[in-house]
Image (cartoon, rainbow, N blue to C red):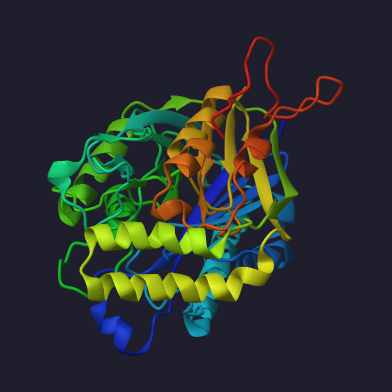
Amino acid sequence: MPSLKASAATAEIAVVGSIRPLLEAPLRASALLIEGDVPVCIVSCDVLGLARDLSDEIANKIVETCRVPHDNILVTCTHTHHAAPNTMQIYMSPRNEEMSRATVAAAIEAAQKARKDLDAAAGKPNECEAEMLFALGQEFTIGENSRWLMPDGQITWYGHDESQMIRPTGPHDVDLPVLAFRRASSGEAPGKFAGVLFCHGTHNIGTLNPKPGTRSPGFFGLAAQELERQHGAPFLFVPGAFGSSHRRDSHVKGPEAMTRVVAAVNDALARLRPTLFGPIASFKRPFTCQYRRFDEAKEAARVNRWCRRWFDAKQAESLERTYAEVRKAMADKRGKTFETVLQVIRLGDAAIVGIPGEMFARLGLDIRRRSPFRNTVVIGLANDEIGYIPDREGHKLDGYQTWFCGHSQLEPGVARRWSRPRSRSSKRRTPGRRRRGQTSSRSA
């Protein structure tokens, strides 16, 4: 079996113009290159999200210049809400092409730097070989399931009276998996990290500077940069199943949230254990989704009911008009299909599942629970951004994440097809196949 090699690198996203003075820390792309019997590359960018054409452009260039197969490349984003101009369409506002080009360039540069470092260390085992380690940390204070039930039966979003909140309508994944690659030890001292990946299922909203207009990697991206300063190696933050989990008007402000994430990752690093080094494999599979069929009058009524309940007339009217414009633009897509991509990466006894959107926490937990691998990490926004991915119960309860719009466009039930086990008649066993004795979840 070949030795395990790893390298990680970062590159700054070249933000220009009037935005640059507003940055409290660089926006970056980070790449982790892992090489065993086959190479795998994971890239994370400090932007809100990337549609499939941009993710594919990044992957295609990595294939060309870094000798990594397309199936073995995962591109995601930290989902910072503070990286405007946006690299994805927001309501009727198109993505900013200059920012998109800068993000693509930085992602490719980071991957190329990681490949160059690995190639330069060829023949020097202590400089390129690494041990793979894993620890499951937790951080349960920086976020929560934001879909709370209100007395009138509606689900919160924002602008609500917190004293009226009854209970959350779903779980929040508090786990913080950490996957680390460490060089050989030197004497009694442990080896240095080659690169570290950590994941959490909360929206990346929060800056150090509370001033409006601050541009930032968000508290997760800031935590990754602080961890890099402490340990002398690149740290990649990747989002989990965070579609139903936010910080909202959290009493844990941005600086404290960053501090708590850093502490949680460091705690996990202190408890790292070697994972079983075995086969490395990666699969990408196209998946056909369907745009939701909707009734215009009913959709307008859903938005109206919520907006008129929590906002003044002027703000409510503005939101209703925005949603009406988006529905009109998307009306011809009703019931039609489009293609996205799903991905699974196997790293010995660890698995990474790439989901192309903002999956609700219940669905992510279900994938992890049913996985046949000892350690499973669910990564959202992987290789595409198709919006919120609610479970069926979420659709029944309604709320902002389920109103038909560009950010919530899927026909209910699509996620159940993603995690559905293969037919018993199938002889081929795949990483996500149900084990004997397990039952299929009906929540998706």
At 53% from the left and 54% from the top, the residue drawn is 381
Q: Where is the N terminus found, in terms of image quarters? A: top right
| Coordinates of residue 139 in the picture (x, y in percent) | 28, 36
From this view, report whether residue 49 is shown above or below residue 215.
above
Residue 331 versus residue 21: which sits nearer the camera? 331
At 34% from the left and 53% from the top, the residue drawn is 224
Q: As drawn, is 403 to the left or to the right of 431? A: left
| Coordinates of residue 50 in the picture (x, y in percent) | 54, 65
| Coordinates of residue 192 in the picture (x, y in percent) | 39, 42
Residue 265 versus residue 367: which sits nearer the camera? 367
At 38% from the left and 86% from the top, the residue drawn is 16
Q: As drawn, is 263 to the left or to the right of 280? A: left
Q: Where is the C terminus found, in terms of image quarters? A: top right
Residue 367 versus residue 321: which sits nearer the camera? 321
At 48% from the left and 40% from the top, the residue drawn is 396
Q: Picture quarter containing residue 328?
A: bottom right
From this view, report whether residue 409 is shown above or below residue 437.
below
From this view, report whether residue 396 is shown above or below residue 307.
above
| Coordinates of residue 368 in the picture (x, y in percent) | 53, 29
Q: As drawn, is 36 to the left or to the right of 255? A: right
Q: Picture quarter containing residue 15?
A: bottom left
